[in-house]
Image (spheres, rainbow, N blue to C red):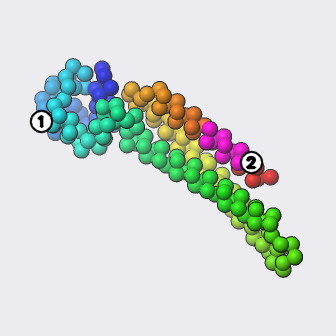
Amino acid sequence: MDIFSARLKFTREKSKLSQKEVAEMVGMSPQGYGKLELGTREPKLEVLAMFPSILNESTDFLLGVRDFDTKATRYYDEYIHLVTKIQMTINRINELKEEKLSADPNSGTTGMFFASNDHIVRIYLDGVSSDEDRKEKIKKRMLSYLETIPYISTETFDYINKRANETVEALINEHKKFKR
């Protein structure tokens, strides 16, 4: 079974369609379609062009040009969004701490400014903790899902796993600095 055949079957099953249903939609016999999934027959270009709309998946994924299907892409995008949000929050906490350090002790509002800043920093830190929990859950789901994709390149999987772990470690270290 080649990459196309394996991913065609994977995507069809993920779409909860039978071979017969897909065969009817593309105008093939069930036996002919079955040969596509077995890898003993290649699809005509016209049939290949129908798969994205039927299976809600790109031909790039089916043909192995891309390793991520639409679900894996959603997980990855959500993960990166949370990592970015956490990093922006940590940057804002840093700014608030810098403002606190550079505040003029002779101004009349210093005490109120410090109390206000400390309260805001605590709120931001609570948000970071909540986002980190969500990020970890998404990371686990994403990595677990990637393991189910047929013929995903080892390099892609290793890169995503390594990048996720490095990002988490960097954020945890940053977060620890700000909690002091």
Residue at the spot 30% in from the left edge and 40% down from the top edge: 58
- Residue hosting label 2: 176
* Snapshot quadrant of residue 48: top left
The residue mark sitting in front, 2 or 1, is: 2
Residue at the spot 23% in from the left edge and 42% down from the top edge: 54
Query: Is residue 170 visible from the viewing direction of this image?
Result: yes
- Residue hosting label 1: 27
Residue at the spot 81% in from the left edge and 64% down from the top edge: 101
The answer to whether residue 161 is magenta is: no
Callout 1 amino acid: Gly
Percent position of residue 24, x then y: 14, 36
Q: Start and end of the magenta stretch?
A: 166-174
Q: Name the residue at the bottom extreme.
A: 108
Percent position of residue 18, x then y: 23, 33
151 w.r.t. 110: above or below? above
Count of marks overlaid on the render: 2
Circle 1 sits in a helix, a strand or a loop, which is it?
loop
